[in-house]
Image (tube, rainbow, N blue to C red):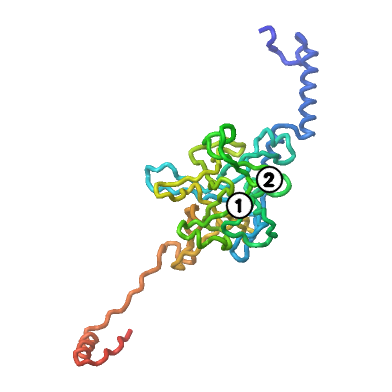
Amino acid sequence: MANVRTYSPSVRVGNWNEDLCLEEDTLKDFLDKRDSGELLVQKTHNLLQNTLRKVDLSVTTDGLLHFGDTVMIVNPGAERNDVRDIRQRDPTALCLNISEYKAHLAAQVEAPCPVSASRIIKPCIRNAFVITSVDGTPNGEALRYGQDFALSTTEGYAGNLKLHSDRVSFLKCAKKSRQQEVSLVSDLTHFIRWKTIAFEPQLRMEYEGLPVQANVKLLITHCKTHQHLNIAQDYVARTPFGYEYEVTAHMDLDSHRAEKETNHWVIITGTPTDDGRTMFDKPRPDPSGLTDRPMEGTGEVRNAGLDPNQTKPAPQTQEKPSMEQMLTQIEQTARGEEALPQTQ
C-alpha cells in the first residue's frame, strides 16, 4: 500500500511535485499523438474510412462482362431447405481482409493480404475488383468462358493486388480449413490466373468461348490447380469488421458430383441509376409479368403495380351458355350442321 496514492496531486502530500510533472507529461503526450493522428481511435476511424469508402461499379450496356470492369464477386448464399438445417447462409462478397495492425502502420494495403467473405455487399474498397487481362486482350473486350483473367483490387489504397492461389502444402494452406489458400499478392505469375465456367454442368462445353453474362451464377476456377473459388462456411475468422467466412480454393461436391452452393458466384455490376444500388439488389421480372422477384438469395418480393392487399390477380370467370343455346347447339350437331358461335 506504500505505492498507492490516496490523494490528488493538488494535495501537498508525499511526492506531490513529481505527480504534477507526470500528469503534465501524460497530457502533453496525448495532445502530441492527437495532433499527429496516432491515437488508436483515429487509426481505427481512418481504417474504416479507407476500406469502406464507396466505389462505383461498372455499368454494362450489353449485359456482358468486359475486361477493365469494376465488379463485385458475390456468393448468393444457401437457403434452408429444412427446419433442422442450420446451414442457412446470407449472401456474402469476396473482400480483402487487412489486419488491423498493418492497417495502422501502412499507407495502403500491402501484399500478401488474406481474403474473406463478408456480409457487407455494398460496393466499397474492400470488395471491389477489376477484371484484368493476362493474355493481352484490350480493355473493353468481352470476357469469355474458359478465358484466363486476373482479379485485381482497385488502384490507390487497395494497392492493385492480384487474387492468388497455389497448391496445398504442409506449410502453405488455409489457417482453419487446411484447404488451398487464397490471398492477394503483387507478383504477376501464373498463379493469379482464373477462368469462368458455366453454371449448368450439361452445357459447359457449349458455353466454352461464348461471352460471359453479368449478374448470373457461374464458377470461378483456378487455372493452375483447377480448384473452384470456395467459401469454407464451417470456418469463421475474426476481422476488424466482424466475423467473416474463410475463402479457399476447393471443389466442394455433393453426392451427385455437382458443385455445392459454396462454389457458386455471381459477378455483380452497377446500375445506371444514382441510388447506390447494384444489380444484385435490383428485382428481376417474374415470368407471369405481375410481380418482380429479386436476385437469388435476397428473399425479397416486390409488388409490380398490384393492389398491396392482392397477392395474385382475380381469376377470370367465363359466362356459361344458357339452356336454349345448349339445346340449339345439340340439334345442329345432330343434323350435321356447324355450331353457331356462342354469344358472350
Instruction: Check disc 2 and report its element: helix, strand or loop.
Output: loop
Residue under pointer 2: 161
Rendering quarter of residue 267: bottom right
The amino acid pointed to by label 2 is: Leu
Q: Nearer the viewer, mark 1 or mark 2?
A: 2
Q: Which mark is residue 72?
A: 1
Give the quadrant of the N terminus.
top right
Looking at this view, is 40 or 179 the one in front?
A: 179
**Dot placed on the residue nearer the N-terminal end, 1 or 2:** 1
Q: Residues within 10 Å of mark 1 (few under 14, many from 20)?
A: many
Give the residue furthest to the top. 2
Give the quadrant of the C terminus.
bottom left
Q: Which residue appears at 71% of the width and 45% of the height?
A: 159
Q: Is residue 21 visible?
A: yes
Residue 95: image x %, image y %?
Answer: 61, 45
Looking at this view, is 52 or 259 the one in front?
A: 259
Looking at this view, is 151 or 165 the one in front?
A: 165
The amino acid pointed to by label 1 is: Met
Residue 103: image x %, image y %?
Answer: 69, 37
Q: Which mark is residue 231?
A: none
Mark 1 to mark 2 CA distance (whole Å): 15 Å
Q: Is residue 247 above or below residue 341?
A: above
Looking at this view, is 208 or 260 the one in front?
A: 208
Q: Is residue 334 above or below residue 278?
A: below
